[in-house]
């Protein structure tokens, strides 16, 4: 039986809701719950909303400049919290400091997108990208391998690695993995990731970092999945201890 994902949204964010709906429908694991496109204050609709949230496995509110003050969205968040539904918000990044109530900046808000009222296409693209990461994370959480998986799926957002060489020296760096398997440090493409092996059943990831010319460095990583999309630890080149932690 497919698990159910309740999507909470403002009518003004209907396009965003449809984007998430399409991603969910493309899986064989989840089905979306969408109560109504036009929300009106009717008892019947209120009961449908409560029933939908009660029946859901996950509750995904889309929090934007359009929905942050929405009576419906805030009531749905409150009800989902009251019955302990797992809440996974998608949040417009510019709103973090003004979030109040059950969803606020002290929480682990992993799914942030850059809002852009002046460039709807750019905003839609960034919203779509973070929505894909969310659905991929849910698939991985349910031990389902996405149809297409890359290191970018397993390393969403910004990360820090901490390493200790055999002689005791240590170091760290912040990085992102973009466009599939590009290793980016401070906005610069530093490595390509090759020879990739992902075994979710054994909780293992292997890959080779290959420097971008004229950098001829390379390193082989063999790491264990401690918490999918959040924390990995293992060895680099067989002797260097290395840990990867998601920071954004």
Image: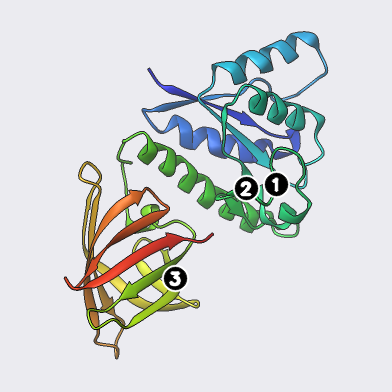
Note whether 99 is above or below 213 in the view shown.
Answer: above
Q: In the shown orientation, is residue 202 left or right of residue 181?
A: left
Give the residue at x 42% y 53%: 230
Label number found at residue 107: 2
Q: Quadrant of residue 80?
A: top right
Residue 123 percent across, percent down from the top left: 64, 55
Q: Quadrant of residue 116?
A: bottom right
Identify the residue position indicated by label 3 in the image. Answer: 175
Residue 181 percent across, percent down from the top left: 34, 64
Question: Of helix, strand and loop, which one carries label 1?
Answer: loop
Note whether 239 is above or below 19 in the view shown.
Answer: below
Identify the residue position indicated by label 1 in the image. Answer: 104
Which one is earlier in the sequence, the residue at label 3 or at label 2?
Answer: 2
Note whether 62 is above or below 228 in the view shown.
Answer: above
Q: Which of 202 and 145 is in front in this view?
A: 202
Q: In the shown orientation, is residue 212 left or right of residue 106?
A: left
Q: Which residue lies furthest to the bottom in this view?
A: 214
Q: Residue furthest left?
A: 238
């Amino acid at each position: 039986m497919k698990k159910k994902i309740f999507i909470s949204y403002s009518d003004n964010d209907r396009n965003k809701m449809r984007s998430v709906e399409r991603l969910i429908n493309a899986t064989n694991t989840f089905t979306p719950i969408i109560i109504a496109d036009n929300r009106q204050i009717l008892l019947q609709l209120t009961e449908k909303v409560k029933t939908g949230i009660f029946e859901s496995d996950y509750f995904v509110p889309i929090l934007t400049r359009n929905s942050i003050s929405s009576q419906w969205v805030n009531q749905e968040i409150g009800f989902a919290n009251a019955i302990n539904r797992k809440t996974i918000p998608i949040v417009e990044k510019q709103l973090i400091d003004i979030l109040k109530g059950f969803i606020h900046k002290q929480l682990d808000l992993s799914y942030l997108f850059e809002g852009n009222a002046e460039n709807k296409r750019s905003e839609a693209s960034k919203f779509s990208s973070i929505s894909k990461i969310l659905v991929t994370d849910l698939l991985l959480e349910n031990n389902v391998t996405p149809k297409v998986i890359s290191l970018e799926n397993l390393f969403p957002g910004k990360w820090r690695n901490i390493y200790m060489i055999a002689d005791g020296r240590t170091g760290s760096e912040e990085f992102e993995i973009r466009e599939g398997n590009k290793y980016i440090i401070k906005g610069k493409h530093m490595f390509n990731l090759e020879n990739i092996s992902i075994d979710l059943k054994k909780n293992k990831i292997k890959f080779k970092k290959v420097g971008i010319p004229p950098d001829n460095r390379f390193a082989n990583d063999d790491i264990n999945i401690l918490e999918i999309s959040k924390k990995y630890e293992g060895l680099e080149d067989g002797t260097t201890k290395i840990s990867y932690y998601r920071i954004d």
